[in-house]
């Protein structure tokens, strides 16, 4: 049986992740075969890998070149440079990816920059679209120094919002400022952001006290989009504030959102903005996938603010 290299869970390896040989993929009728050039890491993948059994294959974000176009004629042609999204097992040198989860990228966008777009970019894009127009409206983004947060600050600014960003540490405030935030606050509890509210939209990824404070700062018909709980999923809040229509809490899961607007569509929108120079990739660390365990540990320990992008050697 033909084999390829892929990232798998190995409990004996650093970060429980290592590059090993696995069975080569085969493509279905609407799948293109992609030779992967770069992958990016997300905290969610690392979290799952830390609890998964040996041999499990993580990975969501990839960029590379179409080695064989889909048999049904859909999607990019052979030789096209693409960015892609899979719900699992994306960290491999060769992948069969549905054409509905692929978007072409121009030569002006590197594989490394493109690889950051699927999970972080689409989460920011789709979450910001959940409560209508942002033009002239206040938006609060917690965890604003992370990959999703940095994309969200940029996209909210492009949408005409007044952006208030919260970061966990003072040294990370520069990331939100560089992305164009109007106000930057330090600390996981965004209660100090209340003076800039109430908010039309809040993107929340911390949980706990941060989520409780965020819910108290919504304007009538405002919405809090919860896409993560990096601190704790447990939260205590005053439910009475919702009796009078004070706001909406929306639980965001990207894998459900791409059923409403395909990954191909979302990625194409992001690629267009990046190609026009209106959106930049928040890459903080570049490296080789042969050292993925080391980088996964650093990301898990919150040593890295932006995106980790690894090239396939």
Image: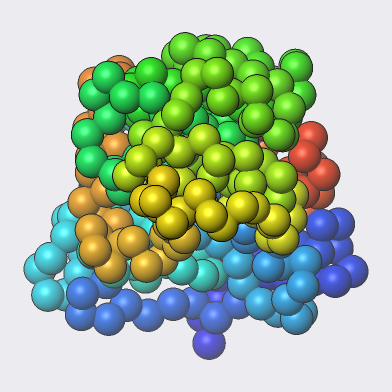
Would residue 257 be visible to someone looking at this image?
yes
The residue most toward the right is: 12
Residue drawn at (57%, 30%), measured in percent from left and top?
A: 144
Q: Residue 185 in the image: x percent, y percent?
A: 64, 19
Asked if residue 153 lies left or right of residue 295, the reply is left
> How many numbered tags mark residues here?
0
Q: Quadrant of residue 124?
A: top left
Residue 60: x percent and y percent? 50, 59
The residue that appears at 63% across and 60% down in the rendered structure is 45
Point out the residue furthest to the left here: 73
- At horizontal 47% and vertical 12% (from top left) the residue drawn is 182
- Residue 271 is drawn in which quadrant? top left
Q: Is residue 106 above or below residue 239?
A: above
Where, by quadrant of the figure, is residue 16 drawn?
A: bottom right
Q: Is residue 91 visible?
A: no
Where residue 248 appears, as percent x and y from the top left, is 40, 52
| Nearer to us in this view, 11 or 165 | 165
Say whether residue 305 is left or right of residue 30.
right
Residue 91 in the figure: left or right of residue 31:
right
Q: Nearer the viewer, residue 166 or 154?
A: 166
Residue drawn at x 69%, y 56% is: 235
188 in relation to 240, above or below:
above
Percent coordinates x, y for residue 195 in the rendering: 55, 18
């Amino acid at each position: 049986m033909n084999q390829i290299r892929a990232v798998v869970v190995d409990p004996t390896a650093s970060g429980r992740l290592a590059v090993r040989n696995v069975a080569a993929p085969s493509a279905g009728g609407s799948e293109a075969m992609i030779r992967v050039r770069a992958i990016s890491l997300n905290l969610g993948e690392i979290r799952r890998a830390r609890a998964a059994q040996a041999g499990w294959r993580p990975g969501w974000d990839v960029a590379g070149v179409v080695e064989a176009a889909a048999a049904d004629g859909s999607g990019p042609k052979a030789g096209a440079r693409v960015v892609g999204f899979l719900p699992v097992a994306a960290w491999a040198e060769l992948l069969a990816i549905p054409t509905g989860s692929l978007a072409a990228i121009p030569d002006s966008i590197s594989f490394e920059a493109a690889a950051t777009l699927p999970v972080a970019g689409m989460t920011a894009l789709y979450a910001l679209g959940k409560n209508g127009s942002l033009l002239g409206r206040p938006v609060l983004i917690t965890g604003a120094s992370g990959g999703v947060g940095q994309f969200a600050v940029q996209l909210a600014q492009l949408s005409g919002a007044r952006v208030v960003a919260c970061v966990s540490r003072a040294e990370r405030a520069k990331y939100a400022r560089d992305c164009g935030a109007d106000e930057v606050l330090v600390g996981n509890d965004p209660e100090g952001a209340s003076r800039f509210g109430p908010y039309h939209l809040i993107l929340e990824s911390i949980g706990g006290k941060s989520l409780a404070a965020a819910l108290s700062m919504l304007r009538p018909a405002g919405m809090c989009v919860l896409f993560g709980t990096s601190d704790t999923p447990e939260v205590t809040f005053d439910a009475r504030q919702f009796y009078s229509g004070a706001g909406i809490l929306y639980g965001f899961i990207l894998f459900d959102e791409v059923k409403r607007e395909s990954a191909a569509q979302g990625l194409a929108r992001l690629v267009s903005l990046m190609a026009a120079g209106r959106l930049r990739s928040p890459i903080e660390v570049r490296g080789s996938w042969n050292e993925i365990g080391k980088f996964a540990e650093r990301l898990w320990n919150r040593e890295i603010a932006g995106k980790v992008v690894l090239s396939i050697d």
